Amino acid sequence: MRNMIRNLILAPAFVAAAALATTSAMAATLKVPFSFVANGKQCPAGYYSVEKGINGNVVTLASKDGSRNFTWVLRPGEPDPSDNAVRLHFESQGETHVLQQVQYGSQVSTSMANKSRHNEYPQATVTAGEGR
């Protein structure tokens, strides 16, 4: 009887720990073929990881060498609810690319733009799994 009670208590804790480990390991690697600006900081072209936070409410963009690290709050977005892609949305301003939004599945980061949704500049998108 004692073992049964212990197993009833430990089983949910084990399942929760396994789910937490799976959630925290959800990251995508993207190759950004151009330098860009994120939150006012210059970022070189290269590989970046995009990881959704454990609670599912934040997303982190980090350079593979660890020199750049950014975190934003996620909110429901316009993408299809079944979309599971990870994308970085950029705006080209002359020779400069400016990161506008991070998409993680059907969620998007809070806007990084200072202007209206209808931008007059060309757009660029980098999607995980493309250009490797």
Image (tube, grey):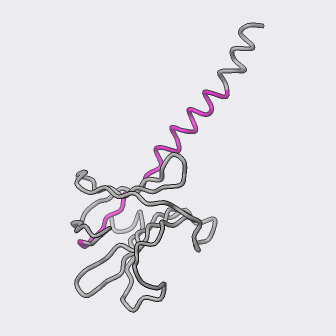
Q: Residue furthest bottom?
A: 120
88 or 112, nearer to the observer: 112
Q: Is residue 101 left or right of residue 69?
A: right
Measured as percent of width and height from the top left, residue 78 is found at 59, 74
74 magenta-colored: no
Look at the image and tell me in which quarter the N terminus lies: top right
Which residue sits at x=22%, y=84%?
A: 95
Which residue sits at x=41%, y=63%?
A: 129
Measured as percent of width and height from the top left, residue 88 is found at 40, 69
Eyeballing the image, is 88 above or below 5? below
Eyeballing the image, is 113 above or below 128? below
Eyeballing the image, is 40 above or below 115? above
Measured as percent of width and height from the top left, residue 111 is found at 46, 72
Measured as percent of width and height from the top left, residue 104 is found at 50, 62
Q: Residue furthest right?
A: 1
Tag count: 0
Residue range in magenta is 12-35
21 magenta-colored: yes
Q: Quadrant of residue 15?
A: top right
Which residue sits at x=30%, y=68%?
A: 32
Which residue sits at x=43%, y=53%?
A: 51
Look at the image and tell me in which quarter the C terminus lies: bottom left
78 or 83, nearer to the observer: 78
Q: Residue furthest top?
A: 2
